[in-house]
Image (cartoon, rainbow, N blue to C red):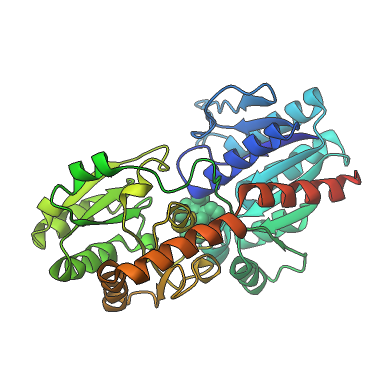
Amino acid sequence: MKIGITCYPSLGGSGVVATELGKLLAERGHQVHFITSGMPFRLGAFHPNIFYHEVDVNNYDVFKYPPYDLTLANRMAQVAKNENLDLLHVHYAVPHALCAFLAKQMVGDHLKIVTTLHGTDITVLGYDSNLSDMIRFGIERSDLVTAVSRDLIRQTKQLLHVEKEIVPVYNFVDKRRYYPKEVSALKKKFAPNGEKILMHISNFRPVKRVPDVIRIFAKVRKEVASRLILIGEGPEMGLVRNMIAELDLTQDVCFLGKQDDVAEVLSLADVMLLPSAKESFGLVALEAMACGVPAVTSDAGGLPEVVLDGVCGFLRPIGDVDGMAEAAIRLLKDEELYRIHSRKGIERSNDTFCHEKIASQYEALYEQLLGVS
Ligand code: GMT
């Protein structure tokens, strides 16, 4: 098949999933065309089946706002025509499904649109009455819609009153890259006295509740000698830094900033913390589990579909800092419990969220849509 993929190419779980899926489809012999505003950060090495088409947004003086959506739609139509694409797989309803709809109007009905919902377009933008009708339109005009968790499907139907069938297709990890790695030398650098390492990775937006991470760590540190590694960047970074200083934790917190590829650093962690207020899936919890690192998270959105409470980590209500700290302490103090959770997490990520399995699921959906067998 000839497949166009559009996603946000900068850091973020949706960009990771879109790019990794494109790479897997290319490995399977399909021709994959990324149509994005920048090179997707995980695209990596050259592959003969992968092509990149940049969307170059002009910022003419006459426009108050750069016309990204129109330029993207035009580029999608150009690539679809020139490369004879079978389908456009877009990640996010707004604006990508709408751009794909416009491109389809320009190219013809044979071009199919697959839209994957990742969360923010529904759970945040869905509440905005300036956008909600447009989001529903984008979903309903797609030929096939998938969502990364059952909870996201429930929320989409409830919030936007969407009639269309939405197929659940979970996110995945590539187990050839995400597995427990030998990092003892690196661990000595971050935890020279054998301290346990707690880790948090996010875009530091309010929805991630990073201040809860700091509060949880402050409690854990009183019971277990430990350190906190923070990865990522975002609007709450200043607030978080101030909080760390006020709580006198500076010596034990390490900021690694944005990292393109976390597969190498995840094995450093003993516990992953993700206390988000909203999380349609929580890719970072899955990536941690694949590396044998149990996750302690909130029970928001799709997280209970990823982390099984008491099996490969713990789920606690949003804002339950005491509960999350207590769960992390249990894991860090009880070696046998830790070993079981770590093993179960690896098994679960290899079974339910295996890259091969999910790529086959998408492939089968495309084939069904195009009527090929
Ligand atoms: O975490 C974010 O806010 C970024 C956002 C994105 O666009 O990558 O993440 C969303 O999509 C990820 C991949 O499907 C999910 O793992 C995240 O849970 C989801 N974020 C939210 O629902 C807040």
Q: Is residue 350 above or below residue 53?
A: below
Percent of width and height locating residue 170: 62, 58
Front in this rendered view, residue 94 or 190: 190
Q: Please say whether residue 276 is visible from this viewpoint.
A: no
221 or 311: which is nearer to us? 311
User: Is residue 77 in view from this perspective?
Assistant: yes
For the C terminus, give its image quadrant: top right
Q: Is residue 355 above or below residue 38?
A: below
x and y percentages locating residue 130 in the rendered image: 57, 59
Residue 148 falls left or right of residue 187? right
Q: How many marks are shown on the rendered structure?
A: 0
| Residue found at x 49% / y 26% | 61
Q: Is residue 313 left or right of residue 79?
A: left
**Horizontal side, residue 246 vs residue 110: left or right:** left
Q: Position of residue 296 (x, y in %)?
A: 37, 67
Please identify the quadrant where the N terminus is shown: top right
Residue 2: x, y in percent?
78, 32
- Name the residue rendered at 48%, 53% in the picture: 290
- Residue at 49% across / 65% down in the picture? 344
